Amino acid sequence: MIKFKSGQTLKEKIAADREAKYQAYVTQLEAKEQAAAESMSNGTNPNAHLQAGIYAMLNATLAPTIAAEALDAANWKDIPGFEKYQIRADGTVRRKAYRVIYRDPPWFFEPRKRHMGRRTLTIHGVNGHRAVAIKANGKVKRIYVDAMVKKLFPEAE
């Protein structure tokens, strides 16, 4: 059995070193939390310059996309009876944006992926007419695209 000058055994020495490292870590975290709380109470944010730069970059990057989506949203109309689907005057059918969450095993703390999904549906030819298959209430229904466009966009003729 190894003993140090302080009279501790090797196991006791390792445990004491771990405890000292843990206490130093906790002290460091508490100091960071206290500094953050003080800066927030003073009305100053130590990372404000970083956040401003990030927001400016995101706004510059996303502004054209947001503007295009706003213009595009005016061209789509909801399909009556199918609240999750929309149609455009040119006959394009899409599912509305919805939140997609991929489930993970229960030992993970958060779901793996989250994103807003939007899907354009495939148009099939049925007896010389364009049609899409739409799922509603667990059943797949066929919607004739040209008839729906005439019904929802009478000015497009």
Image (cartoon, helix red, strand yellow):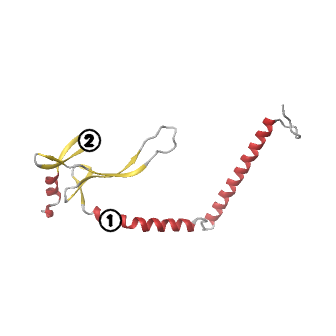
Q: Position of residue 46 (x, y in %)?
A: 61, 65
* First reached walking from the N terminus: tag 1 or tag 2: 1
Outermost front residue: 2
Q: Residue at x 22, y 55 (%)?
A: 92
Closer to the camera in the image, 124 or 50: 124
Q: Position of residue 16 (x, y in %)?
A: 78, 41
Closer to the camera in the image, 154 or 112: 112
- Secondary element under disc 2, as helix, strand or loop, is loop
Q: Which residue is mark 1?
A: 68
- Secondary element under disc 1, as helix, strand or loop, is helix
Report the side of 50 relative to 81 (left or right): right
For residue 137, the mark is: 2
In the displayed structure, would residue 44 be above or below residue 110? below
- In the rendered image, which quarter contains the N terminus? top right
Q: Residue at x 76, y 39 (%)?
A: 15
- In the rendered image, which quarter contains the C terminus? bottom left
Task: Give amino acid for label 2.
Answer: Asn
Q: Quadrant of residue 32?
A: bottom right
Q: Quadrant of residue 31?
A: bottom right
Q: Position of residue 53 (x, y in %)?
A: 52, 68
